Image: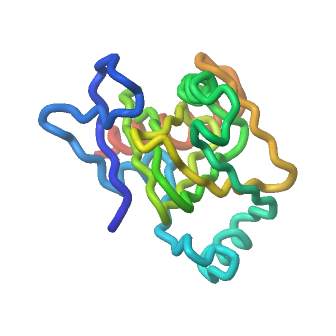
């Protein structure tokens, strides 16, 4: 089964809830690809020996990996950390996350600045492009085990919105937002 994504409602309810619109408006993988989000469904039960994961890591240069358990029992100041993850931000590099256990939500902005909620579950691997506005939260299970992948030395610096002048944001806008507008004008 492919990853699930949908346009979010704008209620102020608990961030861990699904936030479906009524009626729900699902977002296909092709729409996620248009904004630079990549997706793979992998086998998390044997990630050390997964040939597909090895190929992805080699082809994309992901030479550093670590594991992160997020749950109230394992993270000091859990609620505060979760609020920090949920602050809208960008990174200067791709954000690569592979869900090994549990589940959570990545919210990304589309080209019209609307929130799309991506529900990652066991076996889902996503890549968010550098410069895309996004945030993360767990769902109501309050547990996820993620593999984080990086090119070179891990850098995880979040730049909170607004960041329109950040080089990664400018590059993202040129490659995905402005390109989409040009493509529409061509039709």
Q: Is residue 169 left or right of residue 109?
A: right
Q: Is residue 62 left or right of residue 100?
A: right
Count every numbered label the image shows and give the total: 0
Answer yes or no: is residue 164 visible. Answer: no
- Rendered position, 110 above or below 128: above
- Rendered position, 123 above or below 79: below
- Residue plotted at (69% across, 76% down): 48
Q: Quadrant of residue 117?
A: top left
Residue at the farthest left position: 23
Front residue of 187 and 63: 63
- Residue plotted at (14% across, 32% down): 22
Residue 114's spot in the image, x, y percent?
Answer: 36, 28
Q: Quick one: quadrant of the N terminus?
A: bottom left
Front residue of 153 and 12: 12
Residue 170's spot in the image, x, y percent?
Answer: 64, 30
Residue 57's spot in the image, x, y percent?
Answer: 70, 69
Residue at the farthest front position: 73
Q: Quadrant of residue 85?
A: top right
- Residue plotted at (37% across, 24% down): 14
Answer yes or no: is residue 127 visible. Answer: yes
Residue 167's spot in the image, x, y percent?
Answer: 72, 30
């Amino acid at each position: 089964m492919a990853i699930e994504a949908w346009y979010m409602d704008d209620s102020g309810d608990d961030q861990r809830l699904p936030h479906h619109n009524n009626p729900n408006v699902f977002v296909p993988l092709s729409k996620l690809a248009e904004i630079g989000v990549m997706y793979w469904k992998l086998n998390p039960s044997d990630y050390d020996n997964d040939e597909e994961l090895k190929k992805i890591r080699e082809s994309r240069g992901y030479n550093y990996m670590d594991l992160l358990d997020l749950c109230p029992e394992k993270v000091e100041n859990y609620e505060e950390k979760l609020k920090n993850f949920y602050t809208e931000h960008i990174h200067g590099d791709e954000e690569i996350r592979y869900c090994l256990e549990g589940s959570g939500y990545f919210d990304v902005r589309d080209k019209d600045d609307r929130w799309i909620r991506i529900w990652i579950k066991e076996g889902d691997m996503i890549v968010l492009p550098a410069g895309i506005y996004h945030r993360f939260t767990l769902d109501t299970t309050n547990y996820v085990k993620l593999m984080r992948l990086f090119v070179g030395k891990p850098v995880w610096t979040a730049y909170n919105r607004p960041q329109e002048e950040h080089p990664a944001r400018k590059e993202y806008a040129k490659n995905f937002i402005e390109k989409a507008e040009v493509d529409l004008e061509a039709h």
